[in-house]
Image (cartoon, helix red, strand yellow):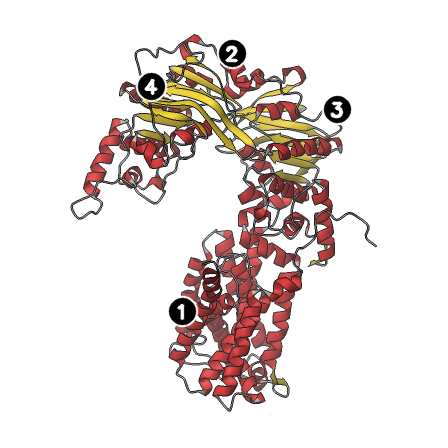
Amino acid sequence: MNTTVRSIPDRLRSPFEQRLKSWESLLLLVAIAIFVANSFASPYFLNAWNLSDATFNFTEKAMIAFAMALLIISGEIDLSVAAIIALASTAMGAAVQMGVGTPGLVFIGLSVGLLCGAFNGILVTGMGLPSIVVTIGTMSLFRGISFIVLGDQAYGGYPASFSYFGQGYVWWVISFEFVLFAIIAVIYAVLLRKANFGRAVYAIGNNPTGAMFSGIRVQRVKFILFLLTGLMSGIAAVCLTARLGSTRPSIATGWELEIVTMVVLGGVSILGGSGTIVGVVIAAFVMGLVTFGLGLLNVPGIVMSIVIGGLLIGVIALPRLWTMWRSR
Amino acid sequence: MLQHPGITTTDVDTTKAVAVLALDKVTKTFPGVKALSEVSLSLYPGKVTALIGENGAGKSTVVKILTGIYQPDGGQILVDDKPTPFPVPQAAATHGVTAIHQETVLFDELSVAENIFLGHAPRNKFGLIDLAAMTEKARALLSGIGADIDPATKLKDLGIASKHLVAIGRALSIDARVVIMDEPTAALSHKEIEELHELVESLKAQGKAILFISHKFDEIFRIADNFTVFRDGQLIGDGAIAEVTEAALVKMMVGRDVSQIFPQRTPNVADTVLSVAGYSHPTEFEDISFELRKGEILGFYGLVGAGRSEFMQALFGITRTSAGAAEIDGAPVQIKSPADAVDNGIVYVPEDRGKQGAILDLPIFQNVSLPSLGRISSKGFLKLAEEFALARSYAERLDLRAASLDTHVGNLSGGNQQKVVIAKWLATQPKVIILDEPTKGVDIGSKAAVHEFMAELAAEGLAVIMVSSEIPEVLGMSDRVIVMREGRIVAELADDDLKPETLVRHAAGI
């Protein structure tokens, strides 16, 4: 029995209670609502294979979004992620032409991702440049290299075993990508919530000066975050290239904004300092379900963008409107 | 009939001139503190009045009342002998009162002319800013104060002294009758100070009344006509500068018994734990060498800008040094970052709690554990129960007052925030703790608790460095005091030398 006098309680509200009133709970309700609406709107929605197909809408983006979430929580951003996919995919395509096998291709894809992340990281943490500017620059740089190498050509001829990463199924309707997505989600959730590293990320995002004055190696943590984002872009490049079976320089165009949207929709503060991986996971499902549902209804892509944009603004404005209405 | 202001112990010739601006028995109370208690002050046209007092004497409060930022609780403001409240800062400006603050409030990305005329720029017939007229007026204004600055330059391209001149230009742009200068020379070099003094002379010649706040006695005696001394929010004395000596001013400034309110300690000083040799920085400090022993409280005293905080931050690995070496327990250490410093047992409680000391938006327990994450985790993963236990033990030791350990530090009072910062560092089990102005902005009750605790830490064998600008605190707590001036150590005082007058003399270089 603990007999010490507890002058100050640990918490006033239990973690469960805090979770119940969180952004993530609200988002989960939105996800359920969209799921129900979809199942009424289209008779093809509630089909295991169709739902499985729907997950491909977000699995690759979400893998990057997890690393991006940590980066944004720390107060930085990486807008070059889609361009890293293009460069990594191009490198793999070129390697295929030289007869490199599946393990070599994966190694090349991940290495290019890491190198691009390291390049961003050095510019931001080593030279103290603002990450938004650096990564807008490297966004053009990385994709530009792809365009120079490929022009209007495409690389194809990927080995059959390589296609497993984008087209394989682990069991019944459960795809390899979905399993990978789930595993990565758990790893990042644990990293952010339970590891020393995650605590440092939150501290830096809230107050970089205070974190530095507390003995946190701020630049080192940020560099690792850029490495992770690059690595995740490399993994996404492997999956996407394997799924499409070819590489064009325009691969994954515009993904950086969809990924940032996913992160922000997931409740991560764009100003840094707060957010959870659970929120990003739910946001990934929300975006995937909306895209898939609208797809089943034959809604054109541009309308989907409008809906996603409206959803983002709506979900973010809703709690603010609620408090404004209540305080009147 | 109004009582004529400003007559207390005065020899000032008030028969000829009417004070253009005066305070009459003004009182200002903040929660828990009486900042000003029935103080009076008079400013005359063409005269420089020096306002003298320690930190916390109430000088800044006076400036804020004179510029309409604070409202007095009692007493009144007199303009040309007529009671005139300044309900808003604009009211002070309308009556020609303008202040040049310690840290200039200017905008780096705007031009010099825009900075000078921000808020009252000349307009053209469309109601838009008349750029040509503004530039011309700014040029005239700047040449009037002998400043050779192009009005089109962006402020960020100017040096600190030129920025001060721009601030002065801005102050004069509203056709000021009264100019308040709050430690204008604290951040300036010798040559720049000369120029500023000349400027004060020329303002004086133009018939402006000047309130000059300074800690530097040489310049007070050089440029001031009158003096007013405050201590603990009370008027101690005023009069003509020609009829007073430095010694008399220092005595008025610090004269009080300081021995009673501090914890009685019997220093139990042991081996040397930290020795610093020749620490230098290109601009901030030079050749700092000293030794620190276990169980000792070493005070660092000096004026604002003497380089104390800058040196401490270098010792903690935040600023790089150009030369110098440090040893912990006789072994040389390389400190290139705060993380290195913490690894070597040196921790730093900064003056700026909100920005540097604590992470206000994180809960108490996470703030306390932040530098000790390695201790409460295994293989890189946190153990929440141990984290709370760690936070609890130090919170209880420091008598922290909070609703729960999950409360955000930003919701605590200044004193309790300071306790969190100290708790955070004690949890790392340091060898040397540096406290930079540990009781600044801390209420009286918490102040005593912090002092008590410092004494306790020293008694347990921790080596304590305390940077403080409060003379009673320095004298009441320190076993030994190092005085810094202009980036150098000018004196090391102990025992019988620990007197207020001695400290002030060394710090001001007189």
Q: Quadrant of residue B113?
A: top left
State how far apart marks 3 and 4 are (Cα): 52 Å
Which of the two discs, 2 and 4, labels the residue nearer the N terminus?
4
Residue for badge 3: B266
Chain identifier of the residue bearing label 3 in the image: B
Q: In the drawing, does residue A226 fall left or right of residue A145?
A: right
Q: CA distance from mark 4 to mark 1?
A: 73 Å
Q: Is residue A177 above or below residue B6?
A: below
Numbered disc 2: secondary structure: helix
Q: Quadrant of the N terminus of chain A?
A: bottom right
Within-10-Å neighbours for mark 3: few <14, some 14–19, many 20+: few
Label 3, secondary structure: give it.
loop
- Kindly indicate whether the residue at mark 1 contacts the one at mark 4 (C-beta within 8 angstroms): no
The answer to whether residue A144 is above or below residue B22 is below
Q: Nearer the viewer, residue A160 or B415?
A: B415
* Disc 1/disc 3 C-alpha distance (Å): 72 Å
Task: Find the distance from the CA under tag 3 to the CA under tag 2.
Answer: 32 Å
Residue B375 seen in this snapshot: no
Q: Amino acid at mark 2?
A: Ala
Q: Are marks 3 and 2 on the same chain?
A: yes
The extreme front residue here reads B1
CA–CA distance between discs 2 and 1? 74 Å
The three-letter amino acid code for the residue at tag 3 is Thr
Residue A144, labelled with which disc? 1
- Mark 3 / mark 2, whichever is N-terminal: 2
Mark toward the viewer: 1 or 3? 3
* Amino acid beneath label 4: Ala
Residue B218 makes an appearance in the image: yes
Q: Give the number of the mark in front: 3 or 4.
A: 4
- Local packing at callout 1 (Cα closer than 10 Å; few below 14, some 14-19, many 20+) is some
Q: Which residue is mark 2?
A: B247
